Amino acid sequence: MPDTPFLDIAHLDAGYGRSQVLFDVTLGIPWRGGVAVLGRNGAGKTTLMKTIVGEIGLSNGKLTFDGRDIGRCPTEERVRLGIGYVPQEHSVFARLSVRDNLAVGALNNPNTAAIDRVLAIFPKLGQRLDQPAGTLSGGERKMLAIGRAMLGYPKLLLLDEPTEGVWIGVIEEITERLIELAKEIAVVIVEQHLDLALRVADYAYVLDRGRVALHGPAGEIRNAPELLRYLAP
């Protein structure tokens, strides 16, 4: 675990109603850099992300963000504090144009400089500004979702499967952008694409049945002999 966590998660239990998904999860996210959360389907990765952003309440444990206990804060307050979230699905407004999707993301900070920055990060979006988001390719929709989240100037960006459904030729572009973002802010990435996740991340956690089964620097996790056992279907 990083020495001085920006987001400190201690002994977290969470789930859906009576169905507990996360058990005694403890992890730390640094002020800057990438952290990967790995695990097979059903390991609890998305539940962890939703608990951090406040879509799911914790039943036990503590969430501390930038020195503040946010365990009982509503989602909108966490966003105002600097947590951005790109969910796995339904991450853009399909009927709105790219321009209008970005305008929605900039509601709390309406300035052209922020949008220009997003278009500089993802130039393809600048060529699609008047196109309905629902007609974009899978990769372009992911770029739009990430760009819209960046308009809130997050200090911590949570990404759930940012390359799911994305053509292989676009994955590299998204990867390079995330590597650059992780030099500026904290980025937490849930990703089935192992090589991508460990290129973006400096540190990695592996979940198995809702518990942290393995963690360490990304290079060590990549070479850990037990890694495939925790990732196999």
Image (tube, rainbow, N blue to C red):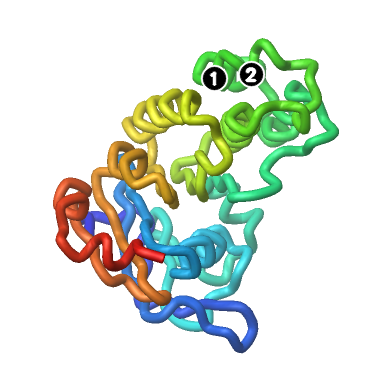
Q: Quadrant of residue 110?
A: top right
* Near-viewer residue (227 or 158): 227
Q: Quadrant of residue 146?
A: top right
Task: Report which residue position mark 1 lands on.
Answer: 122
The Cα–Cα distance between marks 2 and 1, rounded to whole angstroms, is 6 Å
Q: Residues within 10 Å of mark 1 (few under 14, many from 20)?
A: some
Task: Report which residue position mark 2 lands on.
Answer: 125
Residue at the image point whose x is 34% and y is 47% from the top: 194
Question: Does residue 77 appear anywhere in the picture?
Answer: yes
Residue at the image point whose x is 16% and y is 58% from the top: 224
Residue at the image point whose x is 78% and y is 19% from the top: 131
Residue 195 badge: none
Residues tagged 2 and 1 counted as in contact (Cβ below 8 A): yes
Q: Position of residue 129 (x, y in %)?
A: 73, 16
Side of 144 relative to 70 (left or right): right
* Near-viewer residue (225 or 216): 225
Per the image, label 2 sits on a secondary structure element best described as: helix
For badge 1, the amino acid type reads Phe
Is residue 233 placed above or below 16 in the rendered structure? above
Count of numbered tags:
2
